[in-house]
Amino acid sequence: MNSFIIAFDAVFPFLFYISFGYLTRAAGVVDEAFMKKLNQMTFRVFFPLMMFYNLYDRDPGQKLNYAFVTAAVFSVLLLVFILFLLIPRMVKENPRRGVLIQGIYRSNFVLFAIPLTENIFGHAGTATASMLVAIIVPIYNVTAIILLEYFRGGSIRPLGLIKKVLSNPLILGAIAGAAAVMLDFRLPSGVETPISEFSSMTTPLALFVLGGTLRFSSMRSNLKYLVPAIAAKLILLPAIALAAASAMSFEPLETFVYFTMFATPTATASYPMASNMDGDGALAGELVVLSTCISVVTIFLWVFILNSRGMI
């Protein structure tokens, strides 16, 4: 029963925020144009503040486990490489190949990892999640750009790639937070307090917006791609990740953060990126919608299993 309560407490807030956003738009209180504007503001303003504050407010005694970070980076790159070899053998159309690869490996790590970790381990766990997010997100961005360019027959420009990564608001926030930590810089309390409060409202707002932008368009024609991709994303990969974390003897916090890197739904940003880079935008959007909805159930079950087995 205790495991059920922990799993419920970890996941239900996500379902509530997403459902509240969806119902608010469905009731006509807001429209899609407003939600898109709010989504842009959340990404460009609130997420950088959250990334900054989670690093800025971390425990000074907390150290980054470089073996853990190396394993996480290697795991993502290995997964991308394996998918790059497998997907083209199963799917003929280039616009779908890049979208499916991205949809399987690129998680909504930013939106789910930090609050999930906080729900399970408290505020102290968010620094580990934030630090890994700051490292993994650029890898997601770079590999996604390379893959989508490759499958549309475009050229990869290193300088342009670097510029896109460094201009990412999340990366800028993480860099600012890391700089504050390294320089032992402290903000005046009058500035720190509103930043802390803005950071706290980021996740509920982002999930509210995600719910408000969900659309269940016709998915029947893409089910043959959606079903195996989402099964791999939310069931197979988390199982492999947990086995790998156990083999590498990660601490419970590290195990959970590593798990969220693979168990969370397809990144919302994969949809606009695919649409603007000649990928199958409809398929990309459907992967985001379905994986997000189904992940509420799968993450709940995974957390229940992890807690009942004493892994977290």
Image (cartoon, rainbow, N blue to C red):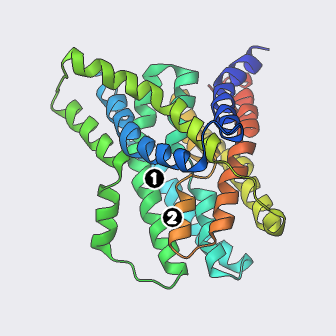
Q: Residue at x 61, y 38 (%)?
A: 246
Q: Is residue 255 visible?
A: no
- Residue 37 on image: x %, y %: 47, 47
Q: Is residue 149 left or right of residue 79?
A: left
Amino acid of disc 2: Met
Q: Residue at x 23, y 31 (%)?
A: 181
Residue 183: quadrant of the picture? top left
Q: How many numbered circles are shown?
A: 2
Q: Is residue 274 left or right of residue 154?
A: right
Identify the disc placed on residue 273: 2
Nearest to the observer: residue 240 or residue 115: 115
Q: Residue at x 76, y 54 (%)?
A: 231
- Residue 80 on image: x %, y %: 55, 64
Nearest to the observer: residue 218 or residue 86: 218
Q: Which residue is mark 1?
A: 73
Identify the disc placed on residue 215: none
The residue carrying pointer 2 sits among few (fewer than 14), some (14 to 19) or many (20 or more) residues within 10 Å by Cα, namely some
Q: Is 160 drawn above or below residue 31 in the view shown?
A: below
> Please, what secondary structure does the residue beneath circle 1 have?
helix
Amino acid of disc 1: Val
Q: Is 249 drawn above or below residue 4 in the view shown?
A: below
Q: Is residue 29 visible?
A: yes
Q: Residue at x 32, y 34 (%)?
A: 52
Residue reaching furthest bottom? 153
In 3D space, how far apart are the residues under numbered discs 1 and 2 (Cα atoms)?
Answer: 22 Å
Residue 298: quadrant of the picture? top right
Q: Is 253 drawn above or below residue 84 in the view shown?
A: above
